[in-house]
Amino acid sequence: MSNKSNKWWYLLFTTPLLLIFITVVIIPFLIGIYYAFFEWDGIAANPKVFVGFENFVQLFGDTRFLASTWKTILFTLLAVISVNVVGLVFALLVTSKLRTANAARTMIFMPYLIGGLILGYIWQFIFLDVFTLFGKVTGFDNVFFNWLIDIDYALYALVFVFTWQMAGYIMIIYIAGIQGIPNDVIEASKIDGANGWQRLRKITFPLLMPAFTISLFLTLSSAFKIYDVNLSLTNGGPANSTEMFAMNIYNEIFGYSNYGFGQAKAIVFFFIVAAITLTQVYITKKREVEM
């Protein structure tokens, strides 16, 4: 097939996708930026008052938004570490000579298939009933209690549930990376006398950098955007101690009917997430090793 014919085929299959992307992503995003410069309650019949950058300036005086920013950053930091450490450990276990490796993969991946809302309600029951009962029976009620009603523990409960949900999915990416490492490199290191830790540190980790790039990007973006688990597990409580970015924006727009101000928050949120994730991809891609 000639190159000219190929171009027409590429154009035929790419154009519909491009049109859909522009319609459902680019145009709404631009409209959202437009609304961020207005004071408006979101009702079409009511007037929109142009306020310029006032909504963006107002953000710095919104203590609840600033608090949710700090909580989201803390949650994301803890979640990225825990999801990737647990996912990597699982990947190393199921790619070893474990007899139940296939069953283990399925069981570990299964939480990712459960929707975030359902997952949150399941763990709400576990924290409320199972944890409390276990604490009373064992006497460790200072550890096993309902974390969701404690301001100091509720965020950790959210990190715990998010890790339980995402670790299996991230494990699959690490498994693909580990299986892509040539066996002859591993065998050569064994012949040279490298022990397990040395092989892990000097061979496995450097050759897994592409998997680290993808996994960190997915975890970062998912943690920043968390809403469904946040809603069903804690609903931002207690006392707004777990109200993340996305929930704060939703409440501003649909709870308090501050459509323009909420859009300004969403635009700032977008640029923060984009800046952090692109920086992470740039740094980790520079450390990738070609085989």
Image (cartoon, rainbow, N blue to C red):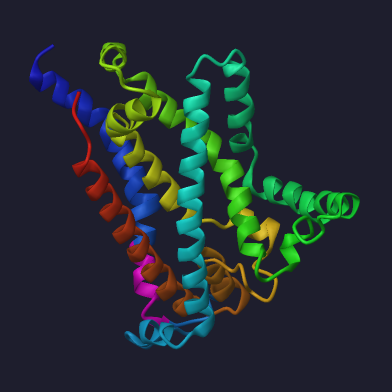
User: In screen coordinates, is 69 left or right of 140?
Assistant: left
Identify the image quadrant of the N terminus.
top left
What secondary structure is the stretch in magenta mostly built from? helix
Identify the image quadrant of the C terminus.
top left
Q: Residue 251 falls in which quadrant of the image?
A: bottom right
Q: Residue 208 falls in which quadrant of the image?
A: top left
Q: Residue 157 falls in which quadrant of the image?
A: bottom right
- Compared to residue 274, the image places residue 96 above or below, namely above
- Relative image position of residue 217 (x, y in whole percent): 37, 46
Q: Is 32 part of what is drawn in magenta?
A: yes
Residue extent of the magenta highlight:
30-38
- Relative image position of residue 198 (x, y in whole percent): 33, 29
- Residue at the extreme front: 193
- Compared to residue 23, the image places residue 215 above or below, namely above
- Compared to residue 254, the image places residue 26 above or below, namely above
User: In screen coordinates, is 25 left or right of 71?
Assistant: left
- Relative image position of residue 250 (x, y in whole percent): 56, 68
Q: What residue sits 75% from the left and 57% below the top? A: 143
Q: Is residue 35 visible?
A: yes
User: In screen coordinates, is 83 left or right of 230?
Assistant: left
- Relative image position of residue 284 (x, y in whole percent): 26, 45
Q: What residue sits 9% from the left and 22% below the top? A: 4
| Residue in the foreground of this view, choosing between 47 and 147 | 147
Q: Is residue 170 visible?
A: no
Q: Is 13 part of what is drawn in magenta?
A: no
| Residue in the foreground of this view, choosing between 46 and 72 | 72
Q: What residue sits 52% from the left and 72% below the top? A: 68
